[in-house]
Amino acid sequence: MWKKLNKNTRKNAVTYLMLIAAYLIMSVLQKGGHLSNLISGMLVLLCVYAIMAVSLNLTVGVLGELSLGHAGFMCVGAFSSALFTQLTMNTGMNAGLRFFIAILTGIVVAAVFGILIGIPVLRLRGDYLAIVTLAFGEIIKNLCNVLFLGKDSNGIHVSMKDTMSLGMEADGIVIINGPQGITRTPKQATFFIGMLILLISLIIVLNLVHSRTGRAIMAIRDNRIAAESVGINVTKYKLLAFTVSAAIAGAAGALYAHNTSSLMATSAKFGYNMSIMFLVFVVLGGIGNMRGGVIAAVLLTVLPEVLRFADDKRMLIYAVVLILAMLWNWTPAARTFREKHSIRRMLAGRAGRQQKESGEAAATNKKEEM
Amino acid sequence: MKKFRKAMGLVLASAMLVASLAACGGEDKKDDQNVDSGSTNGEAVLKIGGIGPLTGGNAVYGQAAMNGAQIAIDEINAAGGINGMMIEFNAQDDEADPDKGVNAYNNLKDWGMQILMGCVTSGSCTAVSDYAHEDNLFLLTPSASSLTSITYDNAFRVCFSDPNQGVGAADYISQHQLASKVAIIYDNSDVYSSGITEKFTAEAQSIGLEIVASEAFNADNKTDFSVQLQAAKDSGAELVFLPIYYNEASLILSQADAMEFKPMFFGCDGLDGILGGVENFDLALAEGVMLLTPFAADATDDLTVSFVTKYQEKYGEIPNQFAADSYDAIYIIKAAMEKAGVTADMSVSEMCDAMKAAMTQISVDGLTGSAITWSADGEPTKAPRAVVIENGAYKAME
């Protein structure tokens, strides 16, 4: 049955199964108390970064455009969803429903920003998207740092100066407090929801890639002129892929915002360094390879934490590991070595030998199975 | 099909291996905890965790804080510990990032932390205090000054809060009639700086100080201040309030001097370190700068002299207020523990409850203030000290 499936379907199924297995193993370990506090505290964060890797992989790997501002989309998603939650917190709305709508808010707002940026920029050729998204990320980060928003009995007040100029009544509460950001958003993001969103975004992206639309997008990536000549609407498909990518980043942001009680638009969190970090996940995992991106995101996020015992040297170890991983993935010598000693080949080789040895018996078995 | 079965077998086998390894890890940890609780062997140990930025842009503050704490712990251990318990200290890096702070906190919990001295920075402290509250673990931050950092009843702090400093500075300027027209230059991407500015502005309005210019910069543009200084100069300000850290302040002082703008400068505890903390800075420019600081490294009381000598011997530099805050923090923990009669076999939660009650009853003489007391909301009560820089040294102001 497995063999009859399309090669891509099989590959995707392995990815999904891997995620589900990872979820089950982690939950069982967590329930049994065998997981260290460190790892169990990081589970949601790992989901967030894995989702970001999937999102950026769509832009970089499938669409073939460079985005250096993906942290900006995450930031937009995080702030808009946290804002929604804060505004509706004491209205008696069901907490689960509120969280669901908050995630949708994050997705929609990030998608709108994706469209706004995509419309002018994706019509151009060359590296313009990289430049514009780089600027976008920085602008969003700085805007969030000077934004003050409060709520009182008269409604919502917004200021770009300070909380004093909000001019609120005595019962007013400040929700977005400039550089202090949004504090004490209820921690509703769980590992289950994180995994669910990761799985859904993977299904969306993988299905998109293997659909008619996905083939059109990849045709544009591989040869724009050829794609145009067969009548593909280049801007439309580029915009579509980029918007989906931004929307997924928004979902990651929403998840992130509901996992931290101190959401601040710092350079370390939403600056371009973070965007580059996402790019590193994608490149290390293999451009266009969703599964690899997710694995790289998880490894690179966990690594600095498990290396804590090495104190200052962990930064050095981290860099060395990164370089080694790049060499392992991309140098010709390592590739030939990997091909020679790959697990798949070993399995195939052994299976082949066994088949010969057991001769007819195996062949009849196989027939029966099929 | 066969291949698939083999692959599945491999996956399951490795999953089992991982699970068994993790299980082993868990058991090992439990054994460790038994040893540490002190019931099995004679030497009782108290585990204090520290969280602060040891790498990255704010590493100066975190490293100083952990060094200061280490000195206090060495002293206490040499003198026989707290209630006979030796202190073990574990400092973890959070890069001033809330997520990394939570990771550091969880890591310390795996280590068996019983008391947390941290976090050094406000944002990280706000995030961590949530988790510490859930675990009912006692938290004393040396230097997180934001109001949101210690909202819970298990959290206390050593330093002044942002509002406290902003209001204190405005009152001081007004009471001593230093100036009537004030300009502010602050970092609007920094929690500390914008927090003080906000309260300073509010207090200034209510007591009749005129703020003629309020100029912001941010973390990405903090090398050229000519625009902000020009605005302050044009507005005719007599005094420029600098609620920022000393690195930026040193640039502002140099650039103001270059454009022949010579108002009075007034800062908060972030300015501490301007004498000796900045390379290639002409100390003559700092003459006459006034600042509110709880700690002055060249004070002549015995406690400060002994601390500064030890710090210099061990780390080769002059301690700043972060080091002093965390040095005090360890002694405050000691005082509260002795008051509460804490023993090492208490659970984290029992210890926290005992400490919470004790904190409001103790009075501590430290480097950053004498007879410091705490209210149940975690805020310290101590008098702000104003100093003026004269002949390259701090001199207390009346």
Image: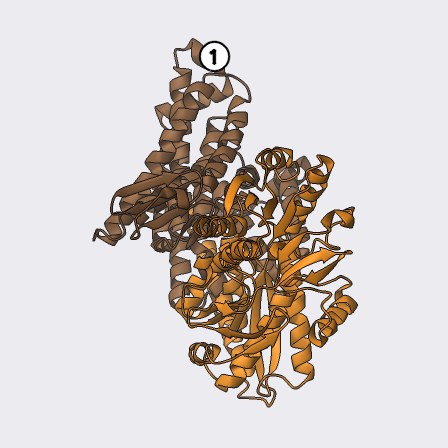
Chain colours: A brown, B orange
Where residue A26 sits in the image (x, y, percent)?
42, 59
In the shown orientation, is residue A55 left or right of residue B302?
A: left
Judged from this view, the residue extending furthest toward the top is A229
| Residue A67 in sight in this render | no
Residue drawn 38% across the image and 25% down it: A240
Tag 1 secondary structure = helix
Percent position (x, y) of residue B90? 60, 69
Q: Where the C terminus of chain B falls, by quadrant?
A: bottom right
Q: State left or right for residue B187 relative to residue A104.
A: right
Q: Where's residue B352, x and y in %?
A: 45, 76
Name the residue: 51% across, 64% down: B105
Reply above or below: A115 against B150. Answer: above
Which sits in the foreground, A279 or A265? A265
Quick check: B365 left or right of B162? Answer: right
Q: Can you name the residue that lies furthest to the bottom here?
A: B42
Image position of A367 with respect to B337: above or below: above
Q: Amino acid at mark 1?
A: Ala
- Could one spot residue B117 in this view of the protein? yes
Q: Chain of mark 1?
A: A
Q: Nearer the viewer, residue B33 or B339?
A: B339
At 46% from the left and 54% from the top, the residue drawn is B11
Frontmost residue, B304 versus B209 = B209
Based on the displayed image, in which of its 4 quarters is residue A29 positioned?
bottom left
Residue placed at 50% from the left, 20% from the top?
Answer: A222
Give the camera-side residue of A92 and B344.
Answer: A92
Residue under label 1: A226
